[in-house]
């Protein structure tokens, strides 16, 4: 009986410990609005510890973000994203959360990518979105998510979306990190400057084919 209780307690405390390590640090105060006196939030937000404003100088506006009413700017592939993290919404700082609005034109995709520091839950506000992820055994979990439905993408796993409906789609994604990171597979592989010979051997492609991929995914190569 005592042994069983001990095992349960140890299990709970181990899980508590593991989940603490797998997320942003716990806040040590109610909130921490970065203090602009110490530099532009855009340039200091990458620091893990930001000097906070005196809470007597904090206002309601620090906790309100109004930049999600409309879609962002569409890329030539028909995807528009507005990442909302402490860089644009200082009120999120130290709270261990951030989110994104993504709009996809008909047929547009959000290419395979992953967030190294966050699980994402996506909510389809409008449209029909083929959504899925791949686990570390290369098993794919994908289906068409309709308006009002959510799907979860576990932390660090490659995931993707495609608007398969007949009208534009809007999704919101919520992250359990204020800085989830976003690594896009095509540009991580072909747009990052990995040695061409290695890419040829890894993918069984010719130098010409590698060149095609590089021109497509490397922002530094002239198109
Ligand atoms: C915050 O501002 C109040 C009011 O001006 C002041 O009394 C307090 O000392 C300040 N706190 C800090 C940590 O500077
Ligand atoms: C869209 O582009 C315009 C012009 O470059 C810019 O002013 C605006 O901030 C952009 N919108 C978003 C949501 O990034």
Image (spheres, rainbow, N blue to C red):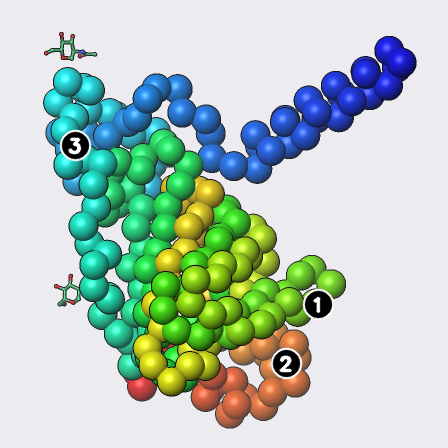
Q: Residue at x 42, y 67 (%)?
A: 147
Work out whether 165 lies above or below 85. Answer: below
Q: Earlier in the sequence, mark 2 or mark 1?
A: 1
Q: Please state the horizontal and vertical placement of residue 118, each as a whole percent of the image.
A: 50, 47
Residue 139 - label: 1
Element class at badge 2 = helix
Quadrant of residue 135 within the rendered picture: bottom right
Measure the C-alpha gap from mark 1 to mark 3: 45 Å
Is residue 120 shown left or right of residue 15? left
At label 2, counting other C-alpha atoms closer than 10 Å, the crowd grade (few under 14, some 14-19, many 20 or more) is few
Near-viewer residue (115 or 172): 172
Q: Earlier in the sequence, mark 3 or mark 2?
A: 3
Work out whether 212 lies above or below 177. Answer: below
- Pointer 1 with pointer 3, Cβ within 8 A: no
- Pointer 3 with pointer 2, Cβ within 8 A: no
Element class at badge 3 = helix
Near-viewer residue (24 or 167): 167
Q: Is residue 43 visible?
A: no
Q: Residue furthest front?
A: 148
Residue 60 - label: 3
Q: Please state the horizontal and vertical placement of residue 63, each as a whole percent of the image.
A: 22, 36
Is residue 102 shown left or right of residue 111? left
Q: Please state the horizontal and vertical placement of residue 129, each as a whole percent of the image.
A: 46, 73
Q: Residue at x 44, y 48 (%)?
A: 175
Is residue 53 shown left or right of residue 161? left
The answer to whether mark 2 is within 8 Å of ligand 2 is no
Is residue 139 shown left or right of residue 199? right
Q: Residue at x 38, y 85 (%)?
A: 166
Residue holding disc 2? 203
Near-viewer residue (111 or 5): 5
Q: Nearer the viewer, mark 3 or mark 2?
A: 3
Q: Nearer the viewer, mark 2 or mark 1?
A: 1
């Amino acid at each position: 009986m005592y042994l069983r209780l001990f095992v349960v307690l140890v299990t709970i405390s181990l899980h508590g410990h593991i989940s603490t390590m797998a997320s942003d640090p716990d806040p040590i105060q109610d909130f921490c609005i970065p203090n602009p006196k110490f530099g532009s939030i855009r340039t200091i937000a990458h620091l893990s510890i930001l000097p906070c404003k005196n809470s007597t100088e904090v206002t309601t506006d620090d906790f309100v973000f109004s930049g999600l009413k409309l879609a962002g700017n569409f890329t030539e592939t028909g995807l528009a994203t507005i990442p909302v993290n402490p860089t644009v919404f200082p009120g999120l700082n130290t709270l261990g959360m951030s989110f994104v609005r993504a709009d996809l034109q008909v047929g547009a995709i959000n290419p395979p990518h992953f967030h190294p520091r966050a699980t994402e839950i996506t909510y389809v506000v409008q449209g029909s979105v083929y959504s899925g992820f791949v686990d570390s055994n290369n098993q794919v979990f994908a289906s068409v998510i309709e308006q009002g439905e959510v799907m979860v993408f576990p932390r660090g796993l490659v995931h993707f979306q495609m608007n398969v409906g007949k009208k534009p789609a809007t999704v919101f994604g919520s992250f359990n990190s204020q800085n989830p990171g976003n690594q896009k597979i095509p540009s991580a592989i072909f747009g990052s400057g990995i040695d061409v010979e290695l890419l040829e051997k890894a993918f069984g492609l010719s130098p010409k084919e590698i060149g095609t991929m590089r021109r497509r995914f490397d922002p530094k190569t002239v198109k």
